[in-house]
Image (cartoon, rainbow, N blue to C red):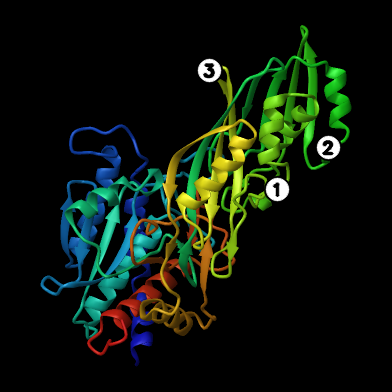
């Protein structure tokens, strides 16, 4: 029996144990809460860390606790760390619409339901069992693999910022916090606050709840006749529904579009930019300024001067996502994703010039440069070969507009845990991972450890 077959047989034999360990983690509602002494992200996040540490110790790993921000678990006690696997144990709130208990693992029709099943507790268990497999099969390993489990990925990754002050990452690093075959490019990200003095026609406006999403709803109160607004609305896109009402002499406008993630804004219909376009046609000067920078239906940044693209990472995208009236100004938030050919400085310079020309002030509130690991590196080639060998599917690196747990690292890639075509309800109600995917992830990671940390490894 060759190594791949031995790994597959071993992992299949541990199916029930894997599910039982995953159930222990899902049972802990590790949603970030107010910090207390010794609990930087809340007590439940520490409970999740300690439970994972217990599991790792049970299987003979060498663990360290990094002040309850993260833990590490090493396969070898003495060898210099060579490969790191980075997972997170914090989860988003359960939200609404569940048909299963969000914090109890429910097995049904080959699916394992529970908050964190796919993001990222299930993949963490797959990584633990991959290391356990390599250890218990006695595969020829002379380079250490370190599992790093954090607790703040969903709210800014302050855990890894702290961890890196105490420890360095291994030279090779992957996270099962993305998709297969492998993500080697993550676009740069910026969030910008824009403001324009308020005129005499716009009373209030609101649109969007999250800066990183296309707003599906927007509304405004205006000092404009309802008839004027209704006539203007006739000339606007049928993709957006407008509801215009007059109550006690005030006119209220609601716009209804379609939400989408800011990394793929072309999949949504922006209710806020549609509303601003309507207000611009009704003579609202501040809306005219914003509509010039952010025309309805445009997502590539042409209007605000930041359009760019490259072959490796694709085109820039942008979303005007939140709006409000504050301190006598119309204030909006913008989300930008840009390719590796640009920089935060370059994007900001172009945006500033375009905004200044229409009287809009800008203030960056978040800036993150693109993340890029060369596709021809030995590390990337090895992981893709493992993926192809285990799954039988072609493996090509991909670029994304979103960010994963390795975005702020020098050398990290995202390797799984979602397979092409998967629909796991991540961040939604009834989140799940299939038993098949859980086992297959563990097999892929065990083969990757064997390939990257084995005694005959010379390419990476």
Q: Please say if 444 is above or below 276.
A: below
Residue depth check, mark 3 versus mark 2: number of the one nearer the observer: 3
In the orientation shown, which residue stands out farthest toward the left?
Answer: 78
Q: Is disc 2 surrounded by few (<14), some (14 to 19) or many (20+) residues within 10 Å?
A: some
- Picture coordinates of residue 216, whole percent (x, y): 66, 38
- Picture coordinates of residue 248, whole percent (x, y): 76, 6
How far is disc 3 from disc 1 in space, using C-alphas?
29 Å
- Picture coordinates of residue 122, whole percent (x, y): 40, 59
Label 2, secondary structure: give it. loop
Q: Please say if 145 is above or below 460.
A: above
Q: Name the residue at 23% across, 54% down.
A: 164
- Picture coordinates of residue 82, whole percent (x, y): 23, 73
CB of mark 3 within 8 Å of CB of mark 2?
no
Is residue 299 left or right of 332 when viewed as pictured? right
Q: Name the residue at 36% across, 73% down.
A: 445
Viewer-proximal residue among 433 and 405 = 405
Picture quarter with the C terminus: bottom left
How far is disc 3 from disc 2 in space, using C-alphas?
30 Å
Q: Which mark is residue 51?
A: none
Q: Name the residue at 84% across, 30% down.
A: 233
Label 2 sits on residue:
236
Q: Is disc 1 surrounded by few (<14), some (14 to 19) or many (20+) residues within 10 Å?
A: some
Is residue 431 left or right of 59 when viewed as pictured? right
In the orientation shown, which residue stands out farthest toward the bottom?
Answer: 1
Picture quarter with the N terminus: bottom left
Q: Can residue 271 be seen in the rendering of this structure?
A: no
Label 1 sits on residue:
298
Label 3 sits on residue:
327
Is residue 425 left or right of 410 when viewed as pictured? right
Label 3, secondary structure: give it. loop
Viewer-proximal residue among 209 and 13 = 209
Choose the circle earlier in sequence order: 1 or 2. 2
């Amino acid at each position: 029996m060759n190594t791949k077959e031995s790994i597959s047989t071993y992992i299949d034999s541990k199916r029930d144990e894997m599910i039982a360990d995953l159930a222990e983690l899902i049972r802990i509602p590790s949603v970030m809460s107010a910090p207390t002494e010794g609990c930087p992200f809340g007590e439940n996040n520490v409970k999740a860390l300690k439970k994972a540490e217990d599991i790792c110790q049970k299987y003979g790993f060498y663990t360290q606790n990094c002040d309850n921000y993260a833990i590490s678990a090493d396969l070898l006690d003495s060898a210099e760390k060579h490969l790191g696997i980075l997972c997170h144990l914090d989860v988003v709130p359960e939200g609404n619409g569940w048909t299963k208990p969000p914090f109890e693992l429910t097995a049904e029709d080959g699916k394992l339901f529970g908050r964190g099943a796919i993001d990222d507790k299930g993949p963490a268990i797959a990584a633990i069992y991959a290391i356990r497999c390599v250890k218990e099969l006695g595969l020829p390993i002379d380079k250490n693999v370190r599992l790093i489990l954090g607790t703040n990925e969903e709210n800014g990754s302050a855990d890894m910022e702290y961890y890196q002050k105490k420890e360095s990452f291994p030279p090779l690093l992957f996270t099962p916090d993305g998709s297969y075959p492998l993500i080697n490019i993550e676009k740069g990200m910026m969030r910008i606050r824009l403001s324009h003095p308020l005129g005499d026609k716009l009373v209030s406006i609101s649109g969007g709840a999250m800066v990183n999403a296309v707003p599906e709803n927007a509304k405004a109160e205006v000092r404009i006749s309802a008839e004027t607004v209704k006539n203007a609305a006739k000339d606007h896109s049928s993709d957006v529904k407008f509801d215009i009402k007059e109550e006690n002499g005030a006119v209220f406008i609601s716009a209804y579009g379609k939400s989408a993630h800011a990394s793929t804004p072309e999949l949504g219909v922006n209710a806020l930019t549609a509303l601003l376009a309507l207000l611009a046609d009704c003579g609202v000067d501040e809306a005219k300024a914003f509509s010039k920078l952010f025309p309805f239906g445009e997502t590539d940044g042409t209007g605000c001067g930041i359009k760019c693209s490259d072959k490796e990472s694709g085109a820039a995208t942008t979303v005007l996502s939140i709006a409000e009236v504050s301190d006598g100004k119309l204030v909006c938030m913008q989300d930008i994703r840009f390719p590796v050919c640009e920089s935060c400085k370059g994007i900001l310079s172009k945006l500033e010039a375009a905004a200044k020309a229409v009287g809009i002030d800008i203030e960056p509130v978040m800036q993150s440069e693109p993340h890029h690991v060369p596709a021809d590196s030995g590390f990337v080639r090895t992981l893709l070969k493992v993926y192809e060998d285990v799954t039988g599917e072609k493996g090509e690196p991909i670029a994304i507009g979103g960010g994963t747990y390795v975005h702020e690292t020098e050398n990290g890639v995202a390797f799984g845990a979602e397979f092409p075509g998967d629909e796991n309800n991540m961040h939604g109600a009834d989140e799940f991972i299939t038993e098949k995917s859980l086992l297959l992830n563990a097999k892929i990671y065990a083969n990757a450890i064997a390939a990257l940390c084995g005694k005959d490894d010379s390419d990476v």
